[in-house]
Image (cartoon, rainbow, N blue to C red):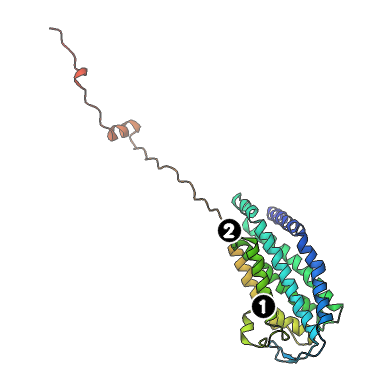
Amino acid sequence: MRRHWSLFATASRYALIGHARNHFAMLLVVVYIPVWIGLAYVTIPDRPAPFRLRATGEILSPPGNHLTQITGALNAVTLIAGFMMFAATFTGGAFDRRLAMAGYPRYHLVLAKLSALTLVCAAIAAYATAAVGCAWPPRQPLVLAAALFCAALTYGALGVVFGSVLRREVEGMFAILMISILDVALQNPLSSSGSDSAVVRFLPTYGAVQASMSAAFSDASAAQGLVIQFLWLIGAACAGFLVFRRRTRNALRPERKPRVPAASGRGTAQGTEGALPPAEPGPSAERVRPT
């Protein structure tokens, strides 16, 4: 048990150090989240924006700037978590593969990455919830933080998938950026007239959007949205584990040893005599008799 804990602690320490060295991601967390939420509060009109919440069926009419702040917070945490995990997986893929080929257990590596991702997403979700609370108090701040946390975890797992599958860094960054923007924008009633469509139920952050809207603007239960988002999280985590396992596999074929024929039971000499017949004596071997 102590050995497993030591392996897990070592891998977790290296994973956290890798995230801490990503200074650009740290800058995004500190600056981008409050700036994005603050600009949405200042620039978007505060006129009521009525819409029907599919998770509860109730009609909500929050101010437009409050609604944009919630979707902006979701967009910010998903982008940051996805970027961080993609960068960590993309840059550390060769190191992880060498560790796995040297005998380091893959399960400890994956659990360490998930633990580091959990800590990072918890900090991001708490920070985004606090930034929203500076402008106006959400009805259920803990549920709002939980929804942001699950959304960030989902995109963090997707970042692991993209970091293991894609070959160039710009491809992964572009994929995460476009998926997050389309995902959240299509569910924003201010920017999309089809936010009440049945198609949005298949988007990665559908459950988080429903839960965060319910937590921010009503006292209704957001359990259904959290359950849906948790299912997305499980699927993304399983996909991340499979591609990580495939990438860290040993691609070299095992060397084949030459097949040695088994010796016969009566000895090596007899086996050799059976395999190679004795040579017949030639003319030079005949004895010359004296006349």
Task: Say which residue label 1 marks.
Answer: 183
Residue kind at label 2, given as amino acid type:
Arg
Q: Quadrant of the N terminus?
A: bottom right
Q: Position of residue 202 (x, y in %)?
A: 62, 80
**Eye-nearest disc, 2 or 1:** 1
Task: Classify 230 as above or below 198.
Answer: above
- Residue 150: percent from left, percent from top: 71, 74
Labels 2 and 1 touching (C-beta < 8 A): no
Q: Nearer the viewer, residue 52 or 289?
A: 52
Q: Quadrant of residue 162?
A: bottom right
Confirm whether residue 142 shows in the render: yes
Q: Earlier in the sequence, mark 2 or mark 1?
A: 1
Left or right of 151: which side holds 261? Answer: left
Q: CA distance from mark 2 to mark 1?
A: 28 Å
Q: Residues within 10 Å of mark 2 (few under 14, many from 20)?
A: some
Looking at the rendered structure, the kind of residue marked 1 is Asp
Instruction: Residue 91: give x, y in percent of width and height.
Output: 67, 57
The answer to whether any part of residue 104 appears in the image is no
Please report the residue visible at 77 percent of the width from the left and 58 percent of the height from the top: 20
Residue located at (71% from left, 74% from top): 151
Please name the residue that numbered disc 2 is placed on: 247
List x then y, in percent, for residue 149: 74, 73
Q: Quadrant of residue 233?
A: bottom right
Task: From the viewer's side, name the closer residue of 92 and 42.
Answer: 42
Question: Which quarter of the rendered picture does the C terminus lie within?
Answer: top left
